[in-house]
Image (cartoon, grey):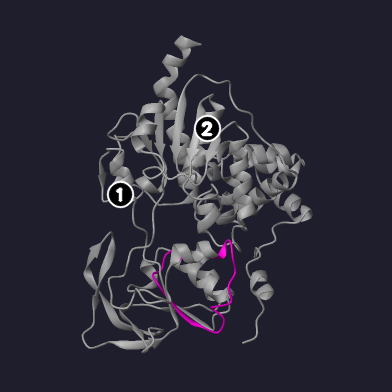
Amino acid sequence: MNISLLDLEKNFHEVDSGFTNREAIEEANRCLYCYDAPCIQACPTGIDIPTFIKKIASENLKGSAKTIMMSNPVGASCSRVCPTEELCEGACVLNHSTKPIMIGNLQRYATDWAIHNNQVLFKAGKKNGKAVAVVGGGPAGLSAARELALLGYKVTIFEAESEAGGLNTYGIVSFRLPQSISFWEVEQVRSLDVEIRTNTRIGTDIPAQELLKNYDAVVLAIGMASVPKLGIKGEDLVGVYDAIDFVKSTKTEITSEFVGKRVAVIGAGNTAIDAATCSVRLGAENVSILYRRTQNEMTAYDFEFEFAKQDGVEFRWLTAPNRIVSDEYGKVTGIECVKMILSDSSVDGRRRPVPIKDSEFIIPVDAVIRAIGQSRYIQLIEEFGIIHEDGVVTLSQDSFVTSNEKVFACGDVIFGKGQGEAMVVSAAQQGKLTAYEIHKKFFKEILETA
């Protein structure tokens, strides 16, 4: 198969070009501007959706973008990756008559205008004498830092990667979310006198105790780590990939090594979909997602599932890997699987898969990508001396404070164990609420010293 790197790079250009000016104005004028708008209630960050849409209709695009970003510090990214059909658009009153307002596309239109016109939307608040360290520069950390800076705190973000933005920068495929969008959101935070120290890993470069000593409060927004091992024979072979690292690599460099290859992706979440669709765009001849349950139990968003099917990704349900097969040179040649059946008992609300005896079979593949969730930064959590359950930080009731009253936590590090669904927009809201809780803690002290 003769495909150039330039052709492959084009495959990673954003798939949706967004609204034209005319389309945006026409769509904005469809909105009923409901007084008690259900779309606002359905948005985890509470964006005043009728107001930002009305400002588009009146061609006040800076005002529209500011309305969005005031509520959601990563609102430009969320306009592309939020499951809007389940959230704001799903709540639109027009669902009962025609079709919902395309809120996500309108949100993108306004924020794209701000990006293309180099708008800086906010100014830092007057310094109040308090300093906060934010560990992790992803959606939750950026949101906490932005709100704290508006409230007058001296904020420093410590980010282990070379760029801030977390999942939005490295973990979501470029053809859905270009890095430039995330970088603009990072710069909006940096413009508020927030110091962002990249390539700085807490626990390695700086001890956790040093932050506890030098800052009035610490926000732990560290996200999650690598994909865990499958626990099967052959997964240490060359040609077996971590889905997180795989998607991350496509954000910085496109390779031709997948051209003409057969790829199996293990798992059926959003990251698995991203790994599969990336493989297609890298020129893979055949891409299959293997999942030990059925479509009903998969955790990927419906729109991600449809997107993968349109890309030609094959789904093999009730299929679990047994071992990865290689040739005499250690090259991956296949994956042995076993057929499953769902039992009546459940785990996490999903029926438990059970292998069918003597149902083993081999699928010929050249590469295998693990996408079965993510592990946790347990060692770092324990360095802060806070209570957790398998890497999910324990919080005080109705609070974002941990077992150490100086340490707050938000984002992926608190998701799990029945504590909500890990969405970018949810992480952004938690970052905001964490900032407000910190401010509430210090408010009286700040007033006394003002």
Is residue 26 visible to us here?
Answer: yes
Q: Residue at x 45, y 62 (%)?
A: 244
In what element is the residue under mark 2? helix
Query: Which residue is at the front of the view, 156 or 276?
Result: 156
Q: Position of residue 25 (x, y in %)?
A: 75, 50
Q: Quadrant of the N terminus?
A: bottom right
Residue on which disc 2 sits = 147
- Could you classify mark 1 by the number of other residues whose Cα lies within 10 Å: few (under 14), some (14-19), or many (20 or more)? some
Mark nearer the N terminus (2 vs 1): 2
- Could you classify mark 2 by the number of other residues whose Cα lies within 10 Å: few (under 14), some (14-19), or many (20 or more)? many
- 431 sits left or right of 11 in the view: left
In what element is the residue under mark 1? helix
Q: Position of residue 291 (x, y in %)?
A: 36, 74
Q: Residue at x 29, y 34 (%)?
A: 396
Residue on which disc 1 sits = 378
Whether 304 is drawn above or below 223: the answer is: below
Query: Which residue is at the front of the view, 399 or 234?
Result: 234
Q: Residue at x 35, y 45 (%)?
A: 414
Whether 392 is drawn above or below 46: the answer is: below
Whether 334 is drawn above or below 172: the answer is: below
Find residue 345 and report its image quarter.
bottom left
Q: Disc 2 marks which amino acid?
A: Glu
Is residue 34 visible to us here?
Answer: no
Q: Position of residue 130 (x, y in %)?
A: 47, 22
Q: Which mark is residue 450?
A: none
Specify the segment rendered in magenta. 250-271
Q: Position of residue 8 (x, y in %)?
A: 64, 74
Q: Disc 1 marks which amino acid?
A: Ile
Q: Is residue 18 magenta?
A: no
Q: In this rendering, which labeled residue sits more in front, label 2 or label 1?
A: 1
